[in-house]
Amino acid sequence: MVTDMGTMNITDNTQLGRFELAENGQITFANYRREGARLAIRHVEATPARRCKGSANRLMTGIVSHPR
């Protein structure tokens, strides 16, 4: 299931267990694991074209600002 998290194009891809941010045709993602009521972010990755451009920061900001 893919759930849209708002205007930043962040989706919760529950099948892959990750949040995804789409920008300019590139995906930055954060792998997570649910531990009861907690959400543990295990790994964040941006494509080489998105590195050093703030994509991971925007993704993480979007994740923590989204109400659960």
Image (cartoon, rainbow, N blue to C red):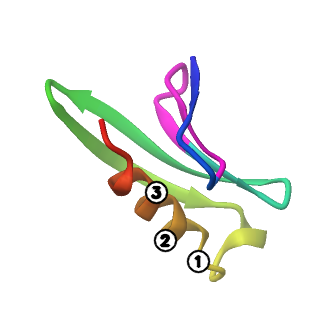
Question: Measuring 15% from the left and 29% from the top, which residue is drawn there?
Answer: 37
Residue of label 3: 62
Q: Position of residue 47 (x, y in %)?
A: 71, 62
| Mark 2 closeness class: few <14, some 14–19, many ≥20 residues within 10 Å | few
User: How far apart are the alpha carbons under marks 2 and 3?
Assistant: 8 Å
64 to 15, vertically: above or below: below
Residue of label 2: 57
Q: Nearer the viewer, residue 46 or 58?
A: 58
6 to 25, vertically: above or below: above
Is label 2 in contact with label 1 (beta carbons under 8 Å)?
yes
User: How far apart are the alpha carbons under marks 2 and 1?
Assistant: 5 Å
Question: Measuring 53% from the left and 41% from the top, which residue is drawn there?
Answer: 5
Q: Identify the secondary structure beneath mark 2.
A: helix
Labelled disc at residue 26: none
Q: Position of residue 13 (x, y in %)?
A: 56, 29
Is label 3 in contact with label 1 (beta carbons under 8 Å)?
no
Residue of label 1: 54
54 to 19, vertically: above or below: below
Q: Which residues are magenta?
A: 9-19
In the image, what residue type sits under mark 3? Gly
In the image, what residue type sits under mark 2? Asn
Is label 2 in contact with label 3 (beta carbons under 8 Å)?
no
Q: Nearer the viewer, residue 65 or 37?
A: 65
Q: Identify the secondary structure beneath mark 3.
A: helix
Question: Measuring 84% from the left and 61% from the top, which residue is drawn there?
Answer: 24
Q: Identify the secondary structure beneath mark 1.
A: loop
Q: Position of residue 62 (x, y in %)?
A: 46, 57
| Mark 1 closeness class: few <14, some 14–19, many ≥20 residues within 10 Å | few
